[in-house]
Amino acid sequence: MKTYKHLFFDLDRTLWDFDKNADETFKIIYSKYGLQNRGVSSLEAFREVYEKHNNLLWSFYRKGEIKKVILNVRRFEMSLNNFGIQDTTLACDIADEYTSMDPNRIYLFPNTIETLEYLFPKYKLHLITNGFEEVQYPKIALSGMKKFFDQVITSEEAGCKKPEKDIFYFAFEKTGATPEESIMIGDDLEVDILGARSVGMDQVYVNYHHKEHDEEVTMEVNDLISLTGLF
Ligand SMILES: [Mg+2]
């Protein structure tokens, strides 16, 4: 194996258990805004349509086709529309609630802290995230991960998003790393893995759900603790 000096981690769905954290937030939103009484059949149904709209809008956001504020409100507005609710004010309120509550959720994937504790003395650890800056920093701090990371690179700071090459070049500049001595660790084949590969960086695909794929990744794990056997 190559000798690596810098390990770059993705945050959402790699270390921070995005879906489990969102479950909590959605439960509160569903009851607080009385969505059941307004025609939203169930929390699960609401979540399902939200995921669909959110994924689509995120793909537009990643390409720079829509702004953050539009993404934030439209995903709820479109989800409410699916249940016959046309209420932009409600969508705005829910969007605000969501972004203010989400960073306070601290569920990490199993063994996140143990794995970071193992890697921390051996490597420089960094984060590269496409998430919104105002939520990512509190998430990192409140979940107890801040002390492990030398640099945090956000897409907002870099002015571009994964999988664009420029965010990785920005990260190399900020950390003083070179692609040859760096490896990207992430859960998203397109965003993290292909992005890293495009700038000549090795990759670890964190494949929690054992998804089948045809990509040639440098390494693949199904849980975080396996990283301690690799590095
Ligand atoms: Mg991710």
Image (tube, rainbow, N blue to C red):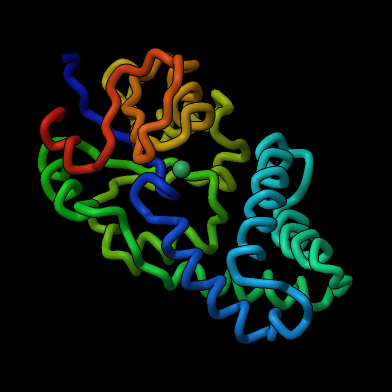
Q: Front-most of 189 and 153?
A: 189
Residue 120: image quadrant is: top left
The residue sitting at 72% across, 46% down in the picture is 57
State how many labels appear.
0
Residue 175 visible in the displayed image? no
Q: Which of the 4 image quarters holds residue 196?
A: top left
Q: Residue at x 62, y 78 (%)?
A: 30
Horizontal and vertical percent position of residue 20: 42, 61
Q: On the rendered structure, is 139 left or right of 49?
A: left
Return the x and y of residue 55 as percentages of the image width and height: 65, 45
Q: Is residue 64 left or right of residue 140?
A: right
Question: Where is residue 116 shown, x and y percent of the image?
Answer: 19, 48
- Judge whether residue 213 can be spotted in this image: yes
Height in image: 44 above or below 211? below
On the image, the x and y values in percent for residue 121 come to 11, 43
User: Image quarter for residue 209?
Assistant: top left
Residue pictured at 80% horizontal, 61% vertical: 82
The quarter of the picture where the C terminus appears is: top left
Q: Is residue 180 above or below residue 38?
A: above
